[in-house]
Structures are given as C-alpha cells and as structure tokens.
Amino acid sequence: MEQVVVLGAEEEPGYGAALALLRDGGFHVCAAATDPGSPQAQNLGCAGAQVLPFHLNSTTGLQGALSGAHKCFFATRTDFTKPDPLQSEISQGYLIADACKQHGIGHVVFEGGQHVQRHFGFPMRSMDAKACISDYMDEIGLRKTQILIPFLYESFLTTFSPKPAGPNLYKIDIPMGDTPMDSISLSDVGPVVTAILKNSHKWAGKSCHLSANRLPVSEYAETLTNYLAPRVFQDSRISLKKFVESYKGEAGQDIGNMFEFWRKDSRRRNAAEMFELFSDAKKFSHWVSTSQDSIITALEK
C-alpha cells in the first residue's frame, strides 16, 4: 500500500484531503501536523492516520514526515502579517520542494497559483507565491500536479458573509461586476486530491483548474434568496476601490486584486475535468440547500 503524507494536515485544505484519503482506504495516510495534539490531528488519528510532527523551519524538520512516503499533498499559506509575505511563502514552498526531491517523492499534489503580477501588472501575493513555487518544482524535476482552487462556497459563512442592508435584505460585497465567478465547496477539494493521487499516471505534470459552478454574483444572490426566503440577497455592485477601502484585514488589496484577476483572466476553468475527478462535486444550489442552518447562523453573528 502506498504511503501518502499530508503536510499541515490539521488545517484546510490538508485536513479535508487527509480525511478523503482515509475514506478511500487505498493509502497508508501520514498526517503531518505542526500541532499533533490539535483536535483535528487527533480526529485524523482516530480515523486511522499515522499522526506525525511537522516542523517547517528547515529541511531537517521535514525529514521525519516525508521519510518512507511515496506521494505528498501540501498547501502553503500566505502570512500577511510578515514583513514580506510573498518571499516568506516562496521560501516555505522551496523548502518543501527540496525535501520532497531529497526523499524521492514520486508524485506531489499541491495548491498552486498563477502569475498575476507578471501577466497583469498588479500583485496578488498569494497566487504569485504559489506560481513561483510551481516553477521551482519544475526546475528541480519534481513530478507534480497543481490544483487551482477558486472561490469557496464556505466563504459565504465567513469573510464574504452577506451584510445586512435592511429588514430581511442582505448585500454581497464581491467586486466581480457581471463577470461570472468560478466556485466549489471546500469539502470537495479532498476527494479531488484523492482522485489525482490514485491516478498519478494520468494527472502528473498537469494543472487542474477546479470549478463546480460559474455564476455572476447576482445569481449566487438569487440562489441564496430562493432557499432562504423571506430573506433577500443582492449583489451590492461594490467597486474594487470601495472593496479595498472597506476590507478589514491585512490583505485587502491582494484580495481585491484576486477578484480583478478573475475578472480579467480570459482562461476558463474546466468544469468537466472537475466532475471527471469527482462526479459528486456539489453545485452551489445543492450546497445552499444542505447548509441553510449554517448560513443563517453566519448571518446572525
């Protein structure tokens, strides 16, 4: 049985990937966690994973996690509180890539990105960093597949929870205008990772642009209205400038630039490829229909 190590398994999307791999039953799953005592790591251990400590401070810190593994999944994080978030994430990714190469990992699946700054002239440091990491993995000859994750349905429960604008009226602040936006459920990322790792011969060397839905913000709002009446949801038609000014957090400009990139990028994600990888991927309407309580709770916070 092949051994797959999931780095950062106590955080999403690693946690979901580890659970999906365990449910599949075709791999020996090593859940490498920075905090092996966390509830998520302990849950994975109870589900059958081998929980290992994971220290991302040197190649040595990765040795125990990667030793004996055949395949690997990881996702780097952009820490916008650091003096140079871009270089910090790139360094993290290079370190993982070097360790995977050193340990002879046969297939690496990771959350990738595109060169926004290079192609459009404005920075989206989270994507730019991941694109640089992907380039480096090519340079050192790692056999890899990058998955590109679009807007997550679950973001409507957190960062992009619709804002009250009157009695039973809510506005969605996403600066996409009339341009359709790709999206998927976070819960479907893990099964996609599992399918790719089970079929390395087919997916190695490819980039998978995930999407289960492609709708304008007005249609996301209409779907929410259909399932959560008498609440009414509308696209606020917020401008990029206003979005950046009103965003609470360090990454406002980067997040705004992410939406601007999605508006301007002419490439289209391949929904058929997504459903080939995971035929049960949820459409947005299905997610809303099964998440009504969670959405209402988020609205009432």
Image (cartoon, helix red, strand yellow):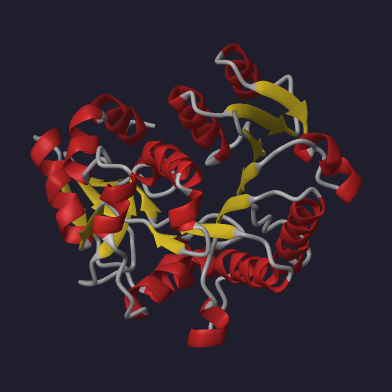
Q: Residue furthest top?
A: 46
Residue 92 visible at all: yes
Residue shown at 29% from the left, 63% from the top: 270
The x and y percentages for residue 149 are 43, 55
Quick one: 258 or 256, which is closer to the camera? 258
197 on left or right of 165: right
The x and y percentages for residue 37 are 73, 19
Q: Is residue 73 above or below residue 271?
A: above
The x and y percentages for residue 64 are 83, 35
Quick one: 293 or 55, which is closer to the camera? 55
Residue shown at 48% from the left, 86% from the top: 120
Give the quarter of the image for residue 132. Answer: bottom right
Question: The N terminus appears in which quarter of the rendering?
Answer: top right
Residue shown at 52% from the left, 64% from the top: 205
Residue 148 visible at all: no
Residue shown at 48% from the left, 23% from the top: 25
Question: The C terminus appears in which quarter of the rendering?
Answer: top left
The x and y percentages for residue 172 are 28, 54
Quick one: 248 or 165, which is closer to the camera? 248
Q: Is residue 293 above or below residue 32?
A: above
Q: How many marks?
A: 0
